[in-house]
Amino acid sequence: MTKRRALVTGGAGFIGSHVADALASAEYDVTALDDLSTGKRRNVAPGVRLEELDIRSPEAAHLVQTGGFDLICHLAAQIDVRKSVADPIADADRNILGTLNLLEAARQAPKPPRFIFSSTGGAIYGDFAEPPSAETEPKDPESPYGIAKLAAEYYVAYYGRVHKLDVVALRYANVYGPRQDPHGEAGVVAMFCQRLIDGTPVTVFGDGRQTRDYVFVGDVARANALAASAAIPRAGRLDVRAFNVGTGVPTSVLDLAEALMRAAGKTCPVEYAPARPGEQQRSFIDVSKSASVLGWTPSVALDTGLKHTYDWFRAIAGS
């Protein structure tokens, strides 16, 4: 029996490598596409092919168009809100134009694949609506990153309506877990883990009361695997084929730091820094639609996920 073929863009990155693993476990023949600007070869499992390409390149478009893929999970992106504030043009170049390059190639493939776009379930909604945010909430992002993701979602919906491409958007909450980069500016859990291991203070921006919805990376990978084959109505509106992927539970940054210290069995000082421009203050999402349509609910509790994540970082530090 011929295996179904899947392409995971950003497949050497934090979330993308876990998605590639989940699809390989589901008996897909998996190819990872990654330019390795932030992804790492060591994240790519044996049996997963790696194509070192930029999603904006003609070569990436050619691979999508001619690769015979049944599924594309598009996770390659500029993911840092602060970088998007500092350089919105670079953010849009990768997150909008890169996505368009792949969509255009996918619709020209002899057998167009299902195209799963990884969006944001936090930054896309903004601070104007009272959380938890459902998929149909008004969207008014606070950052260029959120704006670019929303713009890309509109393009995804357009390709679904006009070109009949089979499209899905997954709106992730704040994803954490093993393989997250502790040295980048995105991923507070990874940064806090590294600070605990190094015995240096954790930095909290603003008053630390801003809330996020922290979802474990294994749960996110499972959402992609379920969305790959779920029966989703072919409807035209943006939000019909979009699904929140989170826990529905708000956690403040200070509470997160305390929970991680409990998981680690050690403490470190907390230092405060000025609030960051473009940062949302309240964010958690309603995941009931994912439960009813995709059959997906989060399975890893925060305390469990934090313990697993800290243990992974500690093992890496000791290796």
Image (spheres, rainbow, N blue to C red):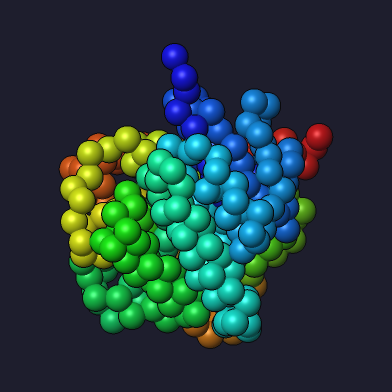
Rendering quarter of residue 209: bottom left
The answer to whether residue 104 is visible is yes
Q: Is residue 85 left or right of residue 170?
A: right
Q: Is residue 93 above or below residue 242?
A: below
The answer to whether residue 73 is visible is no
Give the percent coordinates (x, y) of residue 138.
24, 75
Q: Indicate the quadrant containing the N terminus: top left, top right, bottom left or bottom right.
A: top left
Q: Nearer the viewer, residue 287 or 77?
A: 77
Q: Residue furthest top?
A: 1
The residue under the point 61% across, 41% down is 32
The residue under the point 49% across, 65% down is 100
Give the percent coordinates (x, y) of residue 215.
43, 49
Give the percent coordinates (x, y) of residue 36.
72, 52
Q: Nearer the viewer, residue 64 or 213?
A: 64
Q: Residue furthest right?
A: 319
Label count reads 0
The residue under the point 66% across, 50% down is 34
Q: Is residue 211 left or right of residue 31?
A: left
Q: Is residue 1 above or below residue 241?
A: above
Q: Is residue 84 above or below residue 65?
A: below
Q: Indicate the quadrant containing the C terminus: top left, top right, bottom left or bottom right.
A: top right
The residue under the point 39% across, 78% down is 141
Give the percent coordinates (x, y) of residue 161.
26, 61
Rendering quarter of residue 237: bottom left
